[in-house]
Image (tube, helix red, strand yellow):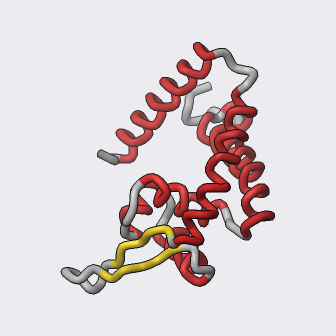
């Protein structure tokens, strides 16, 4: 059977498996911050990115999270409504706004980030240090290959 006529076996198809794994992991973590803080996965991703580097524009958040503009826009709107983010319009270009965590957002981040790191530790506790390093290296290679195929620099 050639690749042209081969049936797609989803349980063996890497993109599908990665998607299922990502959804499983994200969903489990998301329940923790949804229950306590009313945050969606997209909300937390925006906050997590801003927790590391701020201020950022929505375009920069899209690039860092690989979420689409609509997802980021909706998350930013929700976070602005709840007072979790602050927005400052750029004086040089009034169409652009810089986003940062508000004091409320910083407080939530300070509680949620350690909990997500603890969850990650528990997820990986069955792996040796060598296996974790190998997993990290393989994921970096997969990301680089996917970026190259997608034309991302």
Picture residue at 68% right of the left edge, 65% below the top? 40
Location of residue 44 (image quadrant):
bottom right
Answer left or right for 137 relative to 56.
right
Residue 137 pos. (x, y %): 48, 24
Q: Is residue 16 visible?
A: no
Picture residue at 39% right of the left edge, 62% below the top? 54
Answer left or right for 101 relative to 10.
left
Looking at the image, is 66 positioned above or below residue 118?
Answer: below
For the N terminus, which image quadrant? top right
Q: Nearer the viewer, residue 82 or 104?
A: 104
Answer left or right for 98 relative to 100.
left
Q: Nearer the viewer, residue 127 or 102?
A: 102
Q: State the residue lying farthest toward the left.
A: 92
For the C terminus, which image quadrant? top left
Residue 43 pos. (x, y %): 60, 66
Location of residue 100 (image quadrant):
bottom left
Looking at the image, is 99 positioned above or below residue 45?
Answer: below
Residue 102 pos. (x, y %): 51, 72
Picture residue at 36% right of the left edge, 80% below the top? 88
């Amino acid at each position: 059977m050639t690749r042209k006529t081969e049936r797609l076996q989803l349980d063996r198809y890497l993109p599908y498996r990665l998607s299922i794994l990502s959804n499983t992991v994200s969903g489990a973590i998301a329940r923790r911050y949804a229950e306590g803080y009313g945050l969606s996965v997209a909300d937390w991703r925006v906050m997590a990115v801003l927790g590391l580097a701020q201020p950022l524009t929505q375009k920069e958040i899209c690039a860092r999270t690989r979420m689409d503009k609509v997802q980021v826009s909706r998350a930013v709107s929700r976070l602005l409504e709840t007072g979790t983010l602050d927005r400052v319009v750029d004086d040089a270009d009034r169409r652009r706004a810089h986003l940062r965590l508000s004091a409320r957002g910083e407080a939530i981040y300070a509680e949620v980030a350690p909990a997500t790191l603890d969850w990650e530790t528990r997820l990986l506790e069955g792996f040796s240090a060598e296996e974790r390093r190998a997993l990290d290296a393989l994921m970096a290679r997969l990301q680089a290959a996917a970026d190259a195929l997608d034309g991302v620099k």
